[in-house]
Image (spheres, rainbow, N blue to C red):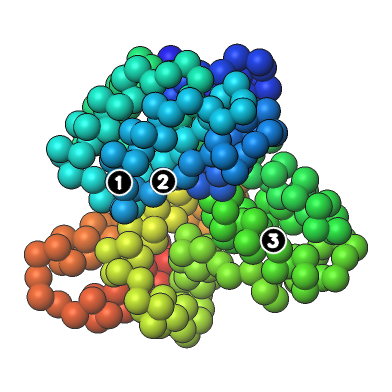
Amino acid sequence: MQYTLESDFAKHVRSPELHRVYLLYGSQSLLIEQYEKKLVQKALHGTFDDFNLHRFNGDELDLQAFYDAVESLPFFSESRCVTLDLTTEQLGAGDLKELCGILEDPPATTTVIITVKRKLERKDRLSGLVKVCIQAGCSVELQESRGGGPQKFLRERAVQYGCELPGSCANYLVNRCGDDLQQLDSELQKVCAYAGGGTITKEQIDAVAVPALQAQIFDLSRAILRGNPTRAMELLDQLLRQREPAGRILAVLSGAIVDLYRGYVVRREAVPLARAAGELGYPKNREFLLKNAMSDSGDYSLPRLVKMLEHLAWADRALKSTGLDDRVLLEQTVIRLFLTSRETA
């Protein structure tokens, strides 16, 4: 079975039903770990864990030991549980084939939980493993938090840490640090410790939360568009000192300008925000990007926006086809974007 909605999988986890094999994969490692913990507790009924729980890691997997753990009978219990973390994916083709053979028909008394903490593409080398897990049990992709998104997760988590996180601050933290739940949880713990209880403020988030690349480049784009080239160069220097690849910086910066262009078109055509966001592929918790772009685009003409996109296209071609120094290329691009943003025509 393949669960396409996290809500359906969550309902299954709460139910008495138990599959023999689970494959949990996706970019939300914290969410994967939380579900793995719940499944382990469900499989073992909270008894004799030390005897009936066996954990394995992919980069040092002994397939014979794994097979023995899966096939063994439970000790003074009705069931046993075997987990395998394949995050590092060190298995060769032969080992993967043998692993699939073990998972094809495990005993009814054993629950096997496989975790892969990244998105699997259609032609992924683990595609055979996915098929086997679906046939022998189930798989689920955990890409982002449902039922309120990362904002709801943060607000609930803040209560556990003795703080209150207003909705506006939850949005701000996601905007600043990205939507990976594990990273957000780590940053929230720091903010709550810094605040020492009470209601979290944006100033406290700014004081200790480390911005994600997207947030840093968002600040870079704002500095360019608001006519502050000195600040833009400072931010670019910070990114390069952090050894962020030039291609990645350029890609995210291009995304910010593309958002601005889309915001201009949506505003000009008077398309409702919700409809435009859906048709343009913005997730519900990222609609604010288009909303901000609609507001910011009021100071720009279509020719200027097109010219800025042409600068970015030039930079992309130059980065891939010339020997120009990455720093020089990015600095030239920032200056070109700044000068275009200041044009009056």
> Front-most of 105 and 170?
105
User: Given contact means CB atoms under 8 Å apart, are the residues at marks 1 and 2 in contact?
Assistant: yes
Q: Which mark is residue 213?
A: none
Give the residue drawn at x 30%, y 69%.
Answer: 245
**Label 2's element?**
strand
Could you tell me how far apart the alpha carbons at marks 1 and 2 are, in whole angstroms? 8 Å
* Residue 330 occupies quadrant: bottom left
Q: Which residue is mark 1?
A: 62
What residue did someone put label 2 on? 56
Left or right of residue 66, residue 235 in this image: right
287 vs 239, nearest the viewer: 239
The tag earlier along the polypeptide, 1 or 3, is: 1
Report the residue marked by disc 3.
188
Q: Residue at x 67, y 74 (%)?
A: 208
Q: Residue furthest right?
A: 198
Q: Position of residue 102 (x, y in %)?
A: 30, 27
Q: Kindly indicate whether the residue at mark 2 contacts the one at mark 3 (C-beta within 8 angstroms).
A: no
Which three-letter amino acid code belongs to the residue tagged 1? Answer: Asp
Amino acid type, residue under disc 3 in the picture: Leu
The amino acid type, in three-letter code, at marker 2 is Phe
For the residue pair 56 and 311, the one nearer the viewer reads as 56
